[in-house]
Amino acid sequence: GATTAAQHLPNQYFNRASFSTTAPDDDTAERTTDKATSEDLAAKTDTQQQQQQQQSNATILRELSKARLSALVVCTTALGFASAGPTALSLTSIPTFAAASIGTALCASSAATFNQVIEVERDRQMKRTSNRPLVTGAVSKEMAMGLGCLTGASGGLMLGLGTDPVTTVLGVGNIALYAGLYTHLKPRSEINTWVGAVVGALPPVMGWTAAGGSLMDAEAVLLGSTLFLWQFPHFFALNWMYRADYKRGGFAMVAVNDPDGDRTAGLIKRYGLYLASVPFVSTALEVTSPMFAVDGGILLNGYALYVASKFDKERTNANARKVFLTS
């Protein structure tokens, strides 16, 4: 009877009944889906923000450490180590090589960070340094100082445990020389360039001593001398290109006090000649083969002197850039 009665009920009844019983389930499912979607979007946004923060932190670290310059410094250390010969290239030397390279990188990073902490106000005045992390406020001085201390201590420890006392003293001493005397002299005396060249000359010597060589070895002296002399044409050209910027920053560079470029051009040519003599000296001392005198002394340095003479005749930024790129 109940079944028969139900069959005679209007269709509208079942439609309403169906609506009243199924609609709440559909609403719940829809709300659940919306909530899940919102949570997914929030999670995705958080992930993107974390990735951006990580990238930002990596960029700050790279810029404070002057990563590209530090990488070049490590390359010269590796070159000095490899120059010690087959023994330095054996498998048993890998731990020492790694310690020398990583320790040098950390010390270079520390020196660069301390330099930026000290020069932040001067960097603010210069176009080429106005985007550095300390200038923009991306990192505080306290955090930068902490990074400098951490990398300096880690670098010194790495060199002390993995190499020898001489290499360790050179590495830690170079932090003091760069962040201390060199940075102090930059706004006060043109001699800062010569002090900075000593800083750049020490890493290949560190590589040599880490491999078991002595500071008194002819190879060590030649490695250091090559890097010392090479820096002058390179940085005098750089100073000339950015002389207006250096003046704004208040730095005592040769080019800032050399409006006509006479001294700058003369120094580039003079140190280019000094550098060209090194391959001949090393050949005479039988440290290198005669081919090094031909390739390095005549061909490579001959072209460098040609570029330097072009700058001497026409002291444009374009010619200075050629000197910079050639040296």
Image (tube, helix red, strand yellow):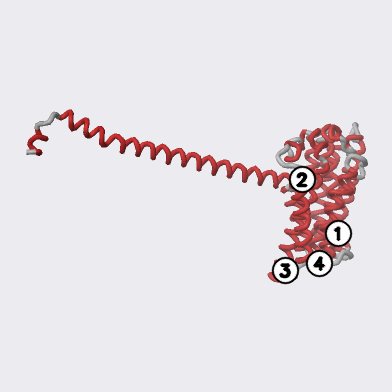
Compare marks 3 and 4 and give the one earlier in the sequence: 3
Q: Amino acid at mark 4?
A: Asp
Q: Can you identify the residue that label 3 sits on?
A: 93
Disc 1 residue crowd, few under 14, some 14–19, many 20+, Cα 10 Å: some
The quarter of the picture where residue 270 lies is top right
**Rendered view: 101 above or below 197:** below
CA gap between label 4 and label 2 equals 32 Å
Q: Amino acid at mark 1?
A: Leu
Compare marks 2 and 1 and give the one earlier in the sequence: 2
Compare marks 4 and 2 and give the one earlier in the sequence: 2
Q: Secondary structure at mark 3?
A: helix
Compare marks 2 and 3 and give the one earlier in the sequence: 3
Q: Nearer the viewer, residue 195 or 162?
A: 162
Q: Position of residue 72 (x, y in %)?
A: 75, 51
Q: Position of residue 95 (x, y in %)?
A: 71, 67
Labels 2, 3: front one: 2
Q: Can you identify the residue that label 1 sits on?
A: 222
Q: Can you identify the residue that label 4 sits on?
A: 164
Q: Residue furthest front?
A: 1
